[in-house]
Each structure stands twice: as C-alpha cells, then as structure tokens.
Amino acid sequence: MAVRRRLPQKGCIGSENGPVRHANPTREADMKRIQCGQLVPGCTFKAQAETDEDVLLMEARHAREAHGIEVTPRFIDRAKTRITEVNPEGQQARG
C-alpha cells in the first residue's frame, strides 16, 4: 500500500517532521465544514477539517457508508458548493 504524503498547505510554514504554523500567527486558522443535511435532508452529520479536500473526503465516505450514495463528480460538485468556513470553535467565520 502506497503512503500518501501531505504537502504543507499554501500559506503555512513547516515540514513533515515539525509543526505547521500559519503564516499569520495573530489570526487563528479557519476550518472548512460541510453539513450532510444540506445534501441529504434530515442527516445531522457534519464534517470539519482544515482543507476543502479533507472535508470532501469525509463527506464522500459518510454519504457512501451511511446513505448508500454513489459518489459521482456531480455529487462532489454539489458538495463543494455547501462548504463553509468556520472558526476553530465551530462558529461561522466572518468573511
């Protein structure tokens, strides 16, 4: 099984062996969130991560396993439009 290495995010400083810190230390990093209920009415699942990609992977896995949804490019496109930014406490980020 191949090991997937994660590259540092744009705007971050760090290495795979050291901590990654954001280039603007005075502002805490915003997180990305998707609420499955916006795609599947009635579902209360929420995925939250640092990147759009990670949130989409979590939502795709949940949709497939919990709802039996075939994750297609169209589903991913719909999901992308439902991603919001939240602060680390989970409150809607101001933009």
Image (tube, rainbow, N blue to C red):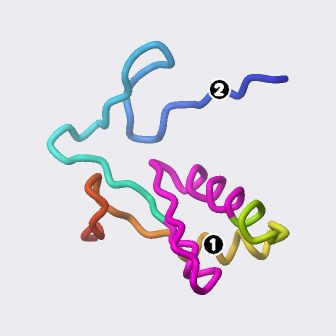
Q: Residue at x 54, y 56 (%)?
A: 52
Quarter of the image with the C terminus in it? bottom left
Q: Which mark is residue 57?
A: none
What kind of element bears circle 2? loop
Residue hosting label 2? 5
63 or 29: which is nearer to us? 63
71 or 53: which is nearer to us? 71
Please identify the residue farthest to the top as the structure is shown. Answer: 17
Residue hosting label 1? 79
Looking at the rendered structure, the kind of residue marked 2 is Arg
Please identify the residue farthest to the bottom as the structure is shown. Answer: 41
47 or 18: which is nearer to us? 47
Looking at the rendered structure, the kind of residue marked 1 is Ala
Query: Residue 38 at x, y = what percent?
Result: 56, 82
- Give yes or no for residue 52 being in the magenta stretch: yes
Q: Residue at x 71, y 56 (%)?
A: 61
- Give yes or no for residue 8 being in the magenta stretch: no
Q: Is residue 9 left or right of residue 25?
A: right
What kind of element bears circle 1? helix
Which is nearer the N-term, disc 1 or disc 2? 2
* Span shown in magenta: 34-62
Label 2 Cα crowd, 10 Å radius (few <14 / some 14-19 / many 20+): few
Position of residue 12 relative to residue 74, above or below, is above
Q: Residue at x 63, y 61 (%)?
A: 59
